[in-house]
Amino acid sequence: MRIPVVAGNWKMFTTASEAVALVRSLKALVRDAAGVEIAVCPPSVNLIPAAEELRDSAIRLGGQNMHWEDEGAFTGEVSAKMLKEAGCHFVIVGHSERRQYFGETDETVNRKVRKAFSAGLAPILCVGETLQERESGRTEAVVKTQLEGGLKGFMADELKTLVVAYEPVWAIGTGKTATPEQAQDVHHFIRTWFEKTFGPAAADGLRIQYGGSVKPDNAKVLMSQPDIDGALVGGASLKADGFAAIIRAAVS
Ligand code: PEP
């Protein structure tokens, strides 16, 4: 039995006061939500104020990105240790926006996943194909390459807290959602790959989120697919009531 995990990726939205207000509203709306793990991933400068507001709440905090080194001359970056001390439980790694705009590769993703685990963070590893890759029939090959690269060198027992997010690039921020069947097919592929690579117990326990224009009105049908264990939500996580509705859809 996998507990669904619904995480909000706030991207580069919210000032500190807006982040605190959003977290405060969300906290009140989901106070009674049981059977679902909830997380918010604000911009890194807003992690500490958000953590303070979340002190009496089960909502977890996540970073949106991190560097793979412990510290050093890497202007503009944050480390795993910094995220951990700020109160993070999760960290998103390999989001398609990071791959597309900031040169993230499967190799750097792999280093980040390794560092996240060693710092006690649970990585949310993002994979997904572009529209061109889907239309040329390469979805599974692309996702397989990203999984192989991102998880290279790991043993099954190191991956217990890993979350994989399947996020078709063509569905992120576009309003186009994968159909439940399209999403389920890729989620099933990911779990099967995981089983072949890390064994049945690891595959059975792996939580695979869907991400890409998840909204209150499509969340339930997506998350009721057998291999979809929650959602990574961008735009719709910026409104407390809409995000709370998505969280409720994960439970029912
Ligand atoms: C995301 O940023 O991970 C995402 C899925 O965005 P959106 O929900 O806005 O498509």
Image (tube, rainbow, N blue to C red):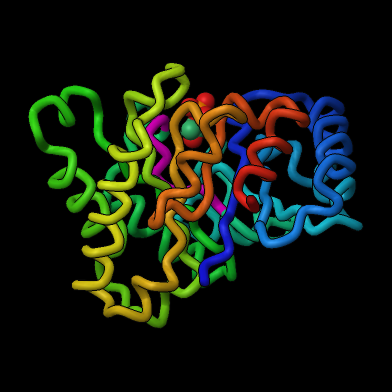
128 or 223: which is nearer to us?
223
Q: Quadrant of residue 135?
A: top left
| Residue 92 pos. (x, y %) | 51, 48
146 or 191: which is nearer to us?
191
119 or 172: which is nearer to us?
172
> Residue drawn 70% across and 51% down?
61
218 or 13: which is nearer to us?
218
Determine if residue 73 is in view. Answer: no
* Magenta extent: 91-97
Is 123 drawn above or below residue 97 in the view shown? below
| Residue 133 pos. (x, y %) | 16, 30
Residue at the left extreme of this rendering: 136
Determine if residue 163 is in view. Answer: yes
* Horizontal side, residue 224 vs residue 56: left or right: left
| Residue 24 pos. (x, y %) | 88, 38
* Horizontal side, residue 116 vs residue 102: left or right: right
> Residue drawn 65% across and 54% down?
83
* Horizontal side, residue 43 vs residue 145: left or right: right
> Residue drawn 34% across and 79% down?
156
* Horizontal side, residue 3 vs residue 69: left or right: right
| Residue 89 pos. (x, y %) | 65, 60
